[in-house]
Image (cartoon, grey):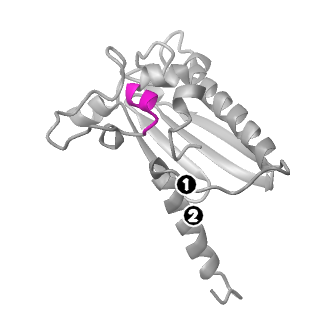
Amino acid sequence: NYNECLHCPGIHPELCDMVPVYAKGVMAANEAPGWSPEAPPAPVLKDGARSWTMTGAPCGPEFPALTQQERANGFNFVTLYPTMFVVAHVDYVRAVSLTPLSAGRTRLVAEWLFTPETLAQPGFDAEGVAAFATLVLKQDAEACEMNQRGLASDRYRCGRLMPQEFDIARFHDWVRSQLADAPGETG
């Protein structure tokens, strides 16, 4: 569910508070109903927040080479198909990898990367920094487990993707292209 935010309003109250556009069930302001290209860019993080920490405060020095726009954005996600995403905040980087173990089980590993200056701060609390994303990951895990129970139900019927799930459609297209290119496949 990393590739959509339809679930965010009901599953992630803290994340929706930190990134207000997520409360609309979309991933970015330009996906929200009523958005106009002429509209001035809205702040991505809530007022006063600079990073994804429980307080919104950076955990250490911000990366010096960031542009003002990158600082205003607060974070940047990069997806590495098929099983990893990396998110850079203004003060740290987080990498999350997912490894399928079976049709219904997945191993998730999240790693936080900090600058030496941040790590050297007196009283630096890595667990405190990780608490926000850990909460979001836990909420996602509970939602995924609920979804897996639904998929295993005798009453399950495949549905269609919603327009807001365009990144999931891209992933499906990527999987199909990989299968078509696999040795021994006839397309």
Numbered badge on residue 94: none
| Residue denoted by label 2 | 172
Residue 52 placement (x, y as % from top left): 46, 24
Query: For the stretch drawn in magenta, what is the main secondary structure?
Result: helix
Q: Marks 2 and 1, how far apart in space?
A: 11 Å
Badge 1 amino acid: Leu
Q: What range of the chain is rendered magenta?
A: 20-26
In the picture shown, does residue 39 fall above or below 43?
A: below
Residue 36 placement (x, y as % from top left): 20, 41
Q: Is residue 112 magenta?
A: no
Disc nearer the start of the sequence (2/1)? 1
Residue 47 placement (x, y as % from top left): 32, 16
Quadrant of res 130: top right
Badge 2 amino acid: His
| Residue denoted by label 1 | 161
Quadrant of res 43: top left
Q: Residue farthest to the top?
A: 123
Q: Nearer the viewer, residue 111 or 5?
A: 5
Q: Residue at x 23, y 35 (%)?
A: 69
In the picture shown, does residue 185 fall above or below 170?
A: below
Q: Nearer the viewer, residue 94 or 154?
A: 154
One can see residue 66 in this view: no
Q: Residue farthest to the left?
A: 38
One can see residue 172 in this view: yes
Q: Quick one: quadrant of the N terminus?
A: top right
Q: Nearer the viewer, residue 93 or 147?
A: 147
Discs 2, 1 touching: Cβ within 8 Å: yes
Q: Is residue 25 magenta?
A: yes
Badge 1 crowding class, 10 Å Cα cut-off, few under 14, some 14 to 19, many 20 or more, is: few
Q: Residue at x 54, y 67 (%)?
A: 174
